[in-house]
Image (cartoon, grey):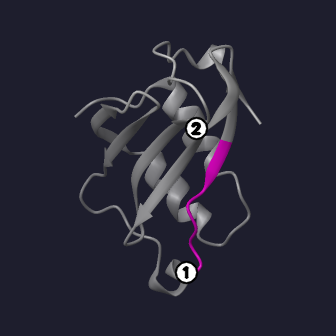
Amino acid sequence: MLSVTSLEKQALDRALDGPQPWMPFLRAQAAVICVKDRRSTGVGQFVEFELPLGVSPVPEEFRDSIFAPSVQVIHPALPYGGSFILWIEDGFINTLECVANAAEWPLDDCAGNFTFE
């Protein structure tokens, strides 16, 4: 397993910074999450996560209301910005999708070069 980068951590924190009743469950998952795989697409990246056994999913009662939390970003190499979309599956954090709006995703993933909107 791989560690979550500082940029991925910032994206998770920003995407999960909401008042919805299911957010605390996802924030608890994000606190113990590990990276299973990272795949570059050129215009973005998919970060697939893995959670330790025993981590609780979002309760069934909230699952129908879950949407994919997202956050917009700007970066010097992204003239039209980009976004991070957090995909949830069966009540668990599954994948962080990084998408450039109209350019190649920067190879420099230094969190200090990204501004979250």
Q: Quadrant of the N terminus?
A: top left
Q: Quadrant of residue 53?
A: bottom left
The residue located at (51%, 18%) in the rendering is 106
The magenta segment: 65-71
The amino acid beneath tag 2 is Ala
The residue located at (52%, 34%) in the rendering is 9
Image coordinates of residue 28 in percent, x first then y, are 49, 55
In the rendered view, tell whether residue 77 sits above or below residue 29.
above
Q: Residue furthest bottom?
A: 61
The amino acid beneath tag 1 is Phe
Does 77 lie within the magenta span? no
Q: Residues within 10 Å of mark 1 (few under 14, many from 20)?
A: few
Residues at circles 1 and 2 in contact by the CB criterion of under 8 Å: no
The residue located at (54%, 54%) in the rendering is 27
Q: Secondary structure at mark 2?
A: helix
In the rendered view, tell whether residue 75 sits above or below residue 11.
above
